[in-house]
Amino acid sequence: MLYKTDNLIIGTSGGADSMSLLNFLYDYNLKINKFNLIAVHVNHCLRNEESDRDAKFVEDFCMNKNIKLYIKKIDIKKIAKEKKIGLEECGRNVRYSIFNDFSLKYENSKIATAHTLSDSMETFFLNLIRGGNLKSLIGIPPVRKDIIRPLIFISREEIEFYCKFNNIKYVTDSSNFDRNYNRNKVRLDIVPVLKKINPSFNSIFKRFINNIFQEEEYLDNISQKIYLNTKLENQKFNIKNLKNLDVCIKKRVIFKILKDFSENIESKHVNLALKSIENNINYINLSCDIKIKLENEILELRKSKIDKKLVWKYKFNKINDLREINKIFLVKKILENFKKYDLKNLVDINKIENLKDVLFRNRRPEDIFCPINRNITKKVKKFFNELKIDKNLRNTLVFLAEKNNVIWIENIGVSEKYKIDENTKKAFFIYQTKNNVQNL
């Protein structure tokens, strides 16, 4: 988990789980002196004085142990309302966005979260209730990219024993007992019944999850080999041998094929593609931006034509969940070491701070843009024609703009007018997350 790690960013709420993790890593690091520990506490501003109490508790602990701490105070209720999503989802998105910001700030870093076996169990049942696939039933993985979860096989009972044995104090979040949240219903109502039926349920669940993981890994390896054998050039796939496979493998291969084209693939898209293949349907639109062409057992993925009347826009925020096109863009404020970042995605803050109504949006007919390193302003349409950008793709690109003045374009970068230069003191770094933040 900690191979080649210099900086360890630890999500710290102040609860029993996170305080156990922080305390353990602190003690462990005293012995090996390998990591720079960085605690990050996110105050969601949802529980008034209780939220402030939690932040103060974490602050006092870190000060006593001389652990570097960052506290971020975020109005989650306001953001959730703007984005029209639930508080739980919004809070998770914001937390991971903040953790990711710090992982970019500190080189050779990993993010440690205090998820436990109990959290994984809750996730398992929530995914089961929603009708998830085999992979979703694995629960919360111990490692995903640069995120590690050292406590994922430790139960809540073991955490509480560890805290008591080591005299570790912690705070309790009163919202954990609010049954308006489905996760709390699972933890408070469903899991206790199962443990009453079988007191060894924790051990059984661990064994069950391990079995699922092994089967999932085996099936994924098989489907990956088949997927690679089908792959041709230019988003084309030879599916001649796909029809004879078991439906389980078929769906997995189709998922990989579609994932090659778009990050936002759901089971409904896989089922539609499977229907197209089995019934020899030549053309089918899978979503607002993906179309399948099937001819002579060659499957080709194309961009669907987007309705030009579809107009969307979002305020310029740290997290920009562009739901019309299933993309999430994050914005990070940079104060130094600009060369570490992709320069074309850096926007000089001083050059845009006096602009009003800066928005993330799709393109407009009147848009103008000044290409980088070219001191000429031209119509975006003409600029796209010069670059020979696919017409189906143009309406899916994300713009940062004020009125018709385009500041930045997805995949192209910043305007000459707003790029950083030798006088730049601060900049915004714009980047897209490959996975939905909530699934990190």
Image: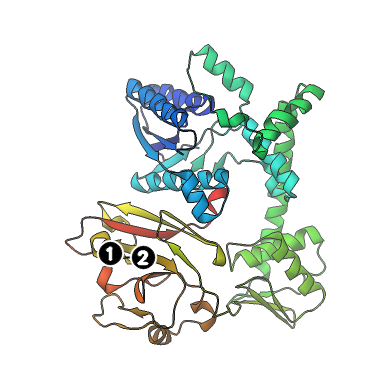
Element under disc 1 = helix
Q: Is residue 4 above or below residue 307?
A: above
Location of residue 269 in the rendering, given as x and y in whole percent from the top left corner? 70, 66
Q: Tell me the amino acid under the disc marked 2.
A: Val
Residue 358: assigned label: 2
Along the line of sight, which residue is nearer the eye, 165 or 5? 165
Identify the residue shown where x is 55% and y is 75%.
Answer: 310
Location of residue 215 in the rendering, given as x and y in whole percent from the top left corner? 74, 46
Number of marks: 2
Q: Tell me the amino acid under the disc marked 1.
A: Ile
Task: Give the class, few, some or many, for how many residues have Cα within 10 Å of label 1's Cα (few <14, many ≥20).
Answer: some
Location of residue 275 in the rendering, given as x and y in whole percent from the top left corner? 79, 70
Element under disc 2 = strand
Location of residue 230 in the rendering, given as x and y in whole percent from the top left corner? 68, 70
Instruction: Name the image quarter holding residue 242.
Output: bottom right
Relative to 65, 373 lies left or right: left
Along the line of sight, which residue is nearer the eye, 87 or 323? 87
Q: Is residue 282 above or below residue 435?
A: below
Residue 352: assigned label: 1
Instruction: Name the image quarter holding residue 369.
Output: bottom left
Identify the residue shown where x is 74% and y is 69%.
Answer: 272
Q: Are marks 1 and 2 in contact (CB under 8 Å)?
A: yes
Residue 226 in sight here: no
Identify the residue shown where x is 50% and y is 36%.
Answer: 113
Residue 282 in sight here: yes
Label located before the other in sequence (1 or 2): 1
Task: Give the class, few, some or many, for how many residues have Cα within 10 Å of label 2's Cα (few <14, many ≥20).
Answer: many
Q: CA distance from mark 1 to mark 2?
A: 8 Å
Identify the residue shown where x is 31% and y is 77%.
Answer: 371
